Image: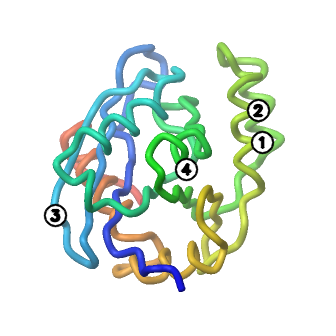
Amino acid sequence: MTRRISNVIGFDDAPFDKHGRGSVLLVGAVYAGPRLVGVVSGKVRRDGAGATQVMARLVSESKFAEQIQAVLLQGIAVAGFNVVDIHGLHAALGLPVIVVARHAPDMVAIRQALETRVRGGSRKWRLIEKAGAMEDAAGLYVQRAGISMAQAEELVRRFAINGKIPEPLRTAHLIAGGVGGGHSRGRT
């Protein structure tokens, strides 16, 4: 019997200039069950390559490090195409990692964009392939590392308090939008 995951962090990025190459705010919302207990933040480079390391550092150096039991991501990339190595993040932290998306991504379009418009696109595409296919779970799509499909689906359902999206991701999205763009907007 595995223990129930009750403490998680959800990451999302702030709005950013689609034509700039600067840093983008990354926000992590830390939850203990249904309650927000903390927030962490850092910067990642737009279309860069350091999101995995930044997330690992934000978790491991936070005062919440001992309590966090899983990491949730709103998509496999932040700040444009700064692709997260979910298996590398799982290995670095020793925690399950779950990528959540409302809709199945258009993998053909993503690959074409990466390979024709993004520096290091072929390497980033390999990270996406390594993460595995998106799987249907609790009315959403997920990719996962270090957690079974049944456990991932149970975790997503349990943290989906105000809709389909798990609350840590919804909160990270709202905070990142409010701080990075002056106000929150759009759907999670």
Label 2 and label 3: CA atoms lie apart by 35 Å
What's the residue type where badge 4 is placed? Answer: Gly
Q: Which residue is mark 2?
A: 126
Cβ atoms at labels 2 and 4 below 8 Å apart:
no
Q: Which residue is mark 1?
A: 129
Label 2: element kind? helix
Label 2 and label 4: CA atoms lie apart by 16 Å
Q: Nearer the viewer, residue 41 or 146?
A: 146
Q: Which residue is mark 3?
A: 37
Label 4: element kind? loop
Q: Which residue is mark 4?
A: 75
Find residue 188 and report its horizontal and vertical position in percent.
Answer: 42, 59
At 43% from the left edge and 56% from the top edge, which residue is drawn?
71
Q: How did the renderer colour the structure?
A: rainbow
Label 1: element kind? helix
Looking at the image, residue 172 lies above or below residue 122 = below
Q: Nearer the viewer, residue 62 or 27?
A: 62
Which residue is farthest front? 1
Find residue 66 and report its horizontal and vertical position in percent.
Answer: 26, 56
Q: For the residue carrying disc 3, how many other residues have a C-alpha within 10 Å: few (<14), some (14-19), or many (20+)?
A: few
- Left or right of 129, for residue 100: left
